[in-house]
Image (tube, helix red, strand yellow):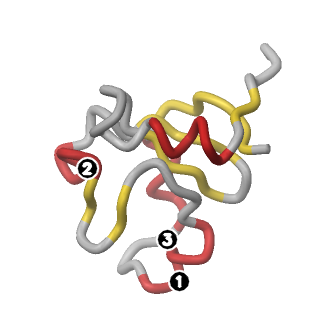
Amino acid sequence: MDELQTYTRGQLALRNGQDKPQIWVAFKGVIYDVSESKLWRNGKHYEHWAGQDLTDELKDAPHSEKVFEKFKTVGKLL
């Protein structure tokens, strides 16, 4: 398996659907590309914003962490 590239929180923050076209979120140190999801249009999903670590916010979501399995892993969060 290829080694995943690492990104800083600042680099992740730029992938918010506004500053750059990519829409990425992090969960438990892994960064996922949610650009293709209709639920993440314009980098916003309900009260959540892309370009952030959503680990602490998942407890308020109506879904489990299994939702991330359908998205491509792009890297690791430093």
Badge 3 amino acid: Ser
Q: Is residue 73 above or below residue 45?
A: above
Question: Relative to 7, is 51 above or below?
Answer: below
Pick the quarter of the image with the N terminus: top right
Residue beneath disc 3 = 64
Q: Nearer the viewer, residue 35 or 16?
A: 16
- Which residue is pictured at 58% across the width and 59% down the height? 53
Label 3: few (<14), some (14–19) or many (≥20) C-alpha neighbours in 10 Å: few
Apparent side of residue 33 relative to residue 5 in the rendered image (left or right): left
Q: Amino acid at mark 1?
A: Lys
Badge 3 vs badge 2, beta-carbon distance below 8 Å? no
The residue indicated by pointer 1 is 59
Which residue carries the number 2 mark?
40
Q: Residue at x 32, y 34 (%)?
A: 35
Q: Name the residue: 59% across, 28% down.
A: 74
Identity, as a three-letter code, of the amino acid under mark 2: Trp
Helix, strand or loop status at disc 1: helix
* 4 to the left or right of 64: right
Gap in Å between the C-alphas at discs 1 and 3?
8 Å
Disc 3/disc 2 C-alpha distance (Å): 17 Å
Q: Comparing marks 1 and 3, which lies closer to the viewer?
A: 1
* Figure quadrant of residue 47: bottom left
- Residue 26: give x, y in percent of width and height: 58, 51
The percent coordinates of residue 36 (x first, y second) are 27, 33
Quarter location, residue 20: top left
